[in-house]
Image (tube, rainbow, N blue to C red):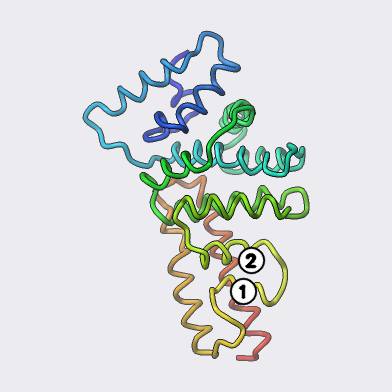
Amino acid sequence: MGSFSKWLGAGLGFTLGGPIGAAVGFALGSFVDGFSAEDLHKEEHQYRQGRRVNTHPGDFEISLLVLASIIIKADGKVDPKELDFVRAQFVGMYGKEKANNAFLLFKGVIKKQVSARQVCIQIRQHMPHASRLQLLHFLFGIAKADGQVAEVEVAEIKKIASYLYINPSDFESIKAMFYNALENNYKILEISKSATNDEVKKAYRKMAKKYHPDKVQDLGAAHLKGAKEKFQSIQSAYEQIKASRGF
């Protein structure tokens, strides 16, 4: 079969093993003739020889695939619009050829029952906080792809956020980016409507720093688009609050 990481076109590290590696192995075995989980374990062993298992751009992509499969199944059905959203996101991030490989893998992963808790433990052990926030942003995008975010999907994303050690304020901030209402602008900035103008400005500076695209630059250019969307949501929220208050 050749190297799986070369086949996907991404360097992989920690996702070659653990529960994520098991899900990937299952998916590959469903459509790659002659492939077995042992092949993946061999790659993991080769990778670990003399190297520290850390986060690579490919690890973010595989983590995203596995978590996306959990969210899409949360409401008991696989909605074609959500699948289309995932495919479109992959094409936008990776280009058509790599996106086709990623989506093929995704359709295999979605057939396997995966423990969200175990997967998230593996992710948080290796992935920095800024990258985990980026994962959460993408998951809300999937949930809203069919036009509305179902409560069962919100509950599943909230559970994933807690497993990833993302605090409730950050969760509510990212969630508010997907709803259009003035009050959500305050949630995005993690402040209340009673905040003073100075507190609004201070909150904006803090959030702009937290969500600056430079924080996830190590994930590669493909993922900067999503990071920039988050950053623009922060800026938009601030501008709308400013306009409503007239300062």
Tell me where residue 63 appears, x and y as whole percent.
Answer: 50, 39
Examine the image and state in which quarter residue 79 appears: top right
Specify the quadrant of the image occupied by residue 78: top right
What's the distance in space between the residues labelled 2 and 1, CA to CA? 10 Å
What amino acid is found at the position of numbered circle 1 in the picture?
Ala
Residue at the spot of label 2: 176
Q: Could you classify mark 2 by the number of other residues whose Cα lies within 10 Å: few (under 14), some (14-19), or many (20 or more)? A: many
Q: Which mark is residue 103?
A: none
**Residue shown at 44% from the left, 26% from the top:** 5
Q: Secondary structure at mark 1?
A: helix
> Does 170 sit left or right of 185 as displayed?
left
Residue 150, given in percent of the width and then of the height, sits at: 73, 53
**Residue at figure coordinates x 62%, y 72% from the top left:** 236
Contact? badges 2 and 1 (CB < 8 Å): yes
- For this rendering, which residue is in front, 47 or 17? 17
- Within 10 Å of disc 1 (Cα), the crowding (few <14, some 14-19, many 20+) is many
Place of residue 197 in the rendered image (x, y in percent of width and height, measured from the top left): 54, 89
- Looking at the image, residue 230 lies above or below residue 25: below
Location of residue 100 (image quadrant): top right
Name the one closer to the observer, 89 or 145: 145
**Residue denoted by label 1:** 237
